[in-house]
Image (spheres, coloured by chain):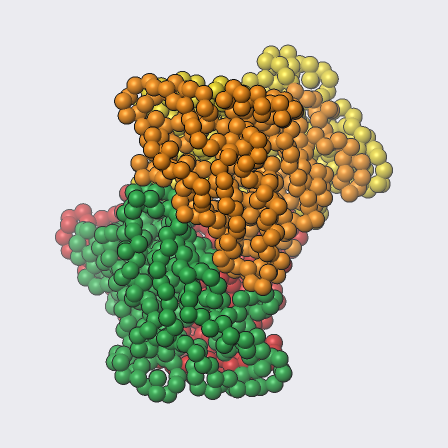
Chain colours: A orange, B yellow, C red, D green
Amino acid sequence: MNSFGRNFRVSLFGESHGTNVGVTIDGVPAGLPICADDFTGDIARRKTGAKGTSPRVEMNIPNIISGVFNDHANGDPITIIFSNTGMNSKSYDSVKDIPRPSHADFVAAKKFRGFEDYRGGGHFSGRITIGLVVAGVIAKKIIAPIEVKAEILEVGGSANINEAIDNALRERDSIGGIVQCVAKVMPIGLGEPFFDSVESVLGHLLFSIPAIKGVEFGEGFRCARMKGSEHNDCYVSSAGRTATNHAGGVIGGISNGNDLVFRVAVKPTASIAREQNTMNFKTNQMDTLSIVGAHDTCIALRIPVIAEAVTAIGLADLLMEEKTHE
Amino acid sequence: MNSFGRNFRVSLFGESHGTNVGVTIDGVPAGLPICADDFTGDIARRKTGAKGTSPRVEMNIPNIISGVFNDHANGDPITIIFSNTGMNSKSYDSVKDIPRPSHADFVAAKKFRGFEDYRGGGHFSGRITIGLVVAGVIAKKIIAPIEVKAEILEVGGSANINEAIDNALRERDSIGGIVQCVAKVMPIGLGEPFFDSVESVLGHLLFSIPAIKGVEFGEGFRCARMKGSEHNDCYVSSAGRTATNHAGGVIGGISNGNDLVFRVAVKPTASIAREQNTMNFKTNQMDTLSIVGAHDTCIALRIPVIAEAVTAIGLADLLMEEKTHE
Amino acid sequence: MNSFGRNFRVSLFGESHGTNVGVTIDGVPAGLPICADDFTGDIARRKTGAKGTSPRVEMNIPNIISGVFNDHANGDPITIIFSNTGMNSKSYDSVKDIPRPSHADFVAAKKFRGFEDYRGGGHFSGRITIGLVVAGVIAKKIIAPIEVKAEILEVGGSANINEAIDNALRERDSIGGIVQCVAKVMPIGLGEPFFDSVESVLGHLLFSIPAIKGVEFGEGFRCARMKGSEHNDCYVSSAGRTATNHAGGVIGGISNGNDLVFRVAVKPTASIAREQNTMNFKTNQMDTLSIVGAHDTCIALRIPVIAEAVTAIGLADLLMEEKTHE
Amino acid sequence: MNSFGRNFRVSLFGESHGTNVGVTIDGVPAGLPICADDFTGDIARRKTGAKGTSPRVEMNIPNIISGVFNDHANGDPITIIFSNTGMNSKSYDSVKDIPRPSHADFVAAKKFRGFEDYRGGGHFSGRITIGLVVAGVIAKKIIAPIEVKAEILEVGGSANINEAIDNALRERDSIGGIVQCVAKVMPIGLGEPFFDSVESVLGHLLFSIPAIKGVEFGEGFRCARMKGSEHNDCYVSSAGRTATNHAGGVIGGISNGNDLVFRVAVKPTASIAREQNTMNFKTNQMDTLSIVGAHDTCIALRIPVIAEAVTAIGLADLLMEEKTHE
């Protein structure tokens, strides 16, 4: 299932080294202003090239091939594609023999019986997330005045990002990080019982982002060590404002109007230049592997804009769902 | 949406103080042996009455009203209902005026415009999870030989459960906890790109369980402080076994055949006997609230069997999905 | 899939000779007035006992077990069950050996590998449609002021219903019929491109009713013999009223505000007392079969209220979908 | 909803006068051989240019941008796009003022509040069906050895197609027709209770094809005038073969192994050169309209390959569904 959403529906397609990657967004209300320039900012935030990110040069010009007419959504599905450029497919010839540790090479080969596009991670590549970013741009327009903003809290266990990246580069290693996302101006009542709680919908989307291994709302894992008298958020206004926001804005799976707050754990990039000892599936012997080429030292750096995007996608879907009850 | 699953489809209905709660499970293969006794063990594990759990006496006799014929699934939807007994609805008369902090009272009233069944949490009650447990029993039969087993890691920050509960009871407070779940004998290849990764599907289900505020796979949040060279799981057998299992058995969203491992954070029960300062929505003034009645001191104690259930439900759905590709 | 609908979601369960049949309706807006009496009229229209219908005595008292609180929808799924009574399961012992021609006995046994509930048609029984009728009652409230009204056009090729039934009873045979349904006060704009045209959604639902073998909108099959100049509906008001309504109120799959008009073909009841020559699957020889027991001579007589119900269900779903675009 | 299918999922996008139209097909098993040449035959059968069809010259070269690797499905979504060429958008400037009778112009303007792409029918254009045809080519591979074959039964009420077209051309009018489709080598057991009967799934898809106003299975509307003793299909082999096939191969919504047979009614093309009297929405007065440009005299001629495609799509989806029960 490369699709998500019941009302605001996002479908992703494409492979890292194919001709294009893209996204179809169905359910966008006719009349929403959309033009190519709208995507520039968030695409730039996701892009490669900065310190700690992949040096792969991506051509990220959105080609809107349907659903927009005279700079407005026309009610039809919006399909946007991006050309792939700057790939070096040759460097992936060996992954069939020595699947890269903690990459999808091995599971993809098993699941798709050897027919998978193994070049650059194929459909498992982070490249595919560009479709999420453009869908997020549209979703942000729909959920206004809700404002979604994500930022890096720490990388490699440190809040000094620059230093942590430098250390990792020097060690030819990679590092993980934690990203926090906050949505302000939240309405009360988003989220559906039982299975489509705000946490369920956003958790589903967040865990679909490559490299995310943990999601927590409000106090998250810290709540397990708190007492009810510490953790409870008491009401201080009849509009539902609470004195504290340990719940991260979600109670019973439903938004309560306070800020929505969550954090995600981003694992260290699996591709590292350091030598690793791993199985050679051709010789059936242990072997060594050093991964060369264009990789992110810290993929967490590129996650905030994607986390914002899926948050906006999820909230747009829930907002539209809420309208069906009116 | 009170339903989950594309192939193994679970729908929940009922309210805490209504006549019944129940579940419909659609998609169960005809011929699967099912009888009322199958449910006894897991229902007992979820039940109230033990130290630290609610003293509410629940009559938990499953009434199978469709889908089972001669002790086998017959291919039709399986509906199982449970009578509600032992409720004291009167004690909830005040929640419309003073919504309980960190309970769904306030958001339910807003979302459902005052028409919600506010007695005992209504449809937001943990009572509803009994349907998950029986669906889980059936799902476990489908996913065999996969074995799913969850256990309490800690409550109130301590691994000494007994002592922590005693302390909380003495303080008339509540405590949270952490539950770990492991699935063994996992096949390779479960999970669907892009949006239906194993983490996405299980995260979705786990976050639908009341009181869960965090979900992490493998190392989870710890991965954010690890280096790639530490976190990567190198292959040591051509069957895909890895020397370590930091990923918790999921790579690229797909199961890799190693043990599936995750943890959830369970918040402290919102209902506490201690006095809380909170808004009285009738007088529009701050007021005090002491919650009396039957409550769990540590709801985390009842989560393992529910966590197992949703894990089995999610894996059953993915297993059936995988069959469509054959 | 025993469920239908994206916004107004109907799930059916139960078997003809089980303890109960029922329905769960999810997505009903909180606050909609609902009480048991609301169902009386439409349930009576569906019931057995009149000339030409089955003499089986059904106890059709709706037992609302969730989703309604103080005579209003409370925002939770509404589950309504009906006890089964008056069954004679013994008379079905032979259907495993001699599957009844044009009944589901044979296909059910194959599909469900011998585990199907074969008594009285099991889940394939018309009994199951009582859930549609009660869902339809709720849907009609939601789509108001749209009015849906279905009626018999002909049975056994004749508009003289009484005479046609008498003839069939005398011949110990069964007869088919045609039902027409009209929805008035239609809004403009229901239906979704591409796959969820009004005709697609209603066709889907109508073809799920047992015994329906044809569905046509507006002129239907007659349009195939018309010229464009005859069939086109020219506009005569800027509100979209057309001089003719050959299209039956649907253009491009979207409602155009004129009356929605369709007809369904209902096959003659498969159960007939007359002797039939058919295979005995036990002896693997041709055999004879005379079906005794409680059967409808003309099932078409009971279809109008069911056709109305599914029409209301489909329109409610599309109306709620339309709200997501606002 | 521009998507259909639970297992074999087809999503359409694009507008008649946009840069491209296309389709995404998700759920295709990895390893299925697919190359561009596979599509040539069915695309040619759909194409314009023959007598009675539109003279618009379409460039119908499939551009496979994802999901196929080394001439095999790779397990990812398959996206195929087609460039639009040969459009004359200018000729549609007037449809905002004088919506064409029995075209979607009026309903699209209402539904999408004036933001619709009105050029050449936009997303309502038959142009969009090229995506169905290529999805159908892939579906046919999946359902093999099932063979689906559709043909024209009559146009303009006559089986003499050539003569009927000549007459219509001379009269500057259009004509409708009837298409019959037969699927041979059918397995027993396709179709899901209650809502996903074979008739429901195919009816849903067939009614999504522009211009289809009626669908009937087996005897279809003729069954309404038959007696049970005439209409019943008695078994003559223990494999389920029946002496007659009045049911068209579907009993209780489930395929019974006999040939699947259905017919669809195709309305006469709405675009006619003859003058029509209709409302001018700008002047709010009755006006006259003569439609010039490239139109099909008998759109029914182009329907068989599309009917085959949606039949294959629906059967592929049901076949894959059936596998989940194994």
Foreground pick, C207 / C150: C207
Residue D268 higher or lower than C49, as above or below: below
Residue A226 higher or lower than C44, as above or below: above
Foreground pick, B255 / C98: B255
- What is the x, y in percent for residue C139? 56, 59
| Quarter of the view holding residue A29 | bottom right
Residue B312 higher or lower than C155, as above or below: above
The reply, left or right, for residue B140 in relation to residue C40 is left
Image label count:
0
- What is the x, y in percent for residue B220? 54, 25
Where's the N terminus of chain B, which quadrant? top right
Is residue C295 something one can see in this rendering?
no
Which residue: 46% across, 25% down? Answer: A272
Foreground pick, B198 / B72: B198
| Quarter of the view holding residue A201 | top right
The reply, left or right, for residue C95 in relation to residue C7 is left
- What is the x, y in percent for residue A224? 63, 22
Where's the C terminus of chain B, which quadrant? top left
- What is the x, y in percent for residue D34? 29, 50
The reply, left or right, for residue C20 in relation to residue D175 is right
Is residue D14 something one can see in this rendering?
yes
Which residue: 61% across, 66% down? Answer: D113
Which residue: 51% across, 84% down? Answer: D289
Foreground pick, D163 / C98: D163
Which residue: 27% across, 69% down? Answer: D151
The reply, left or right, for residue D161 in relation to residue A202 is left
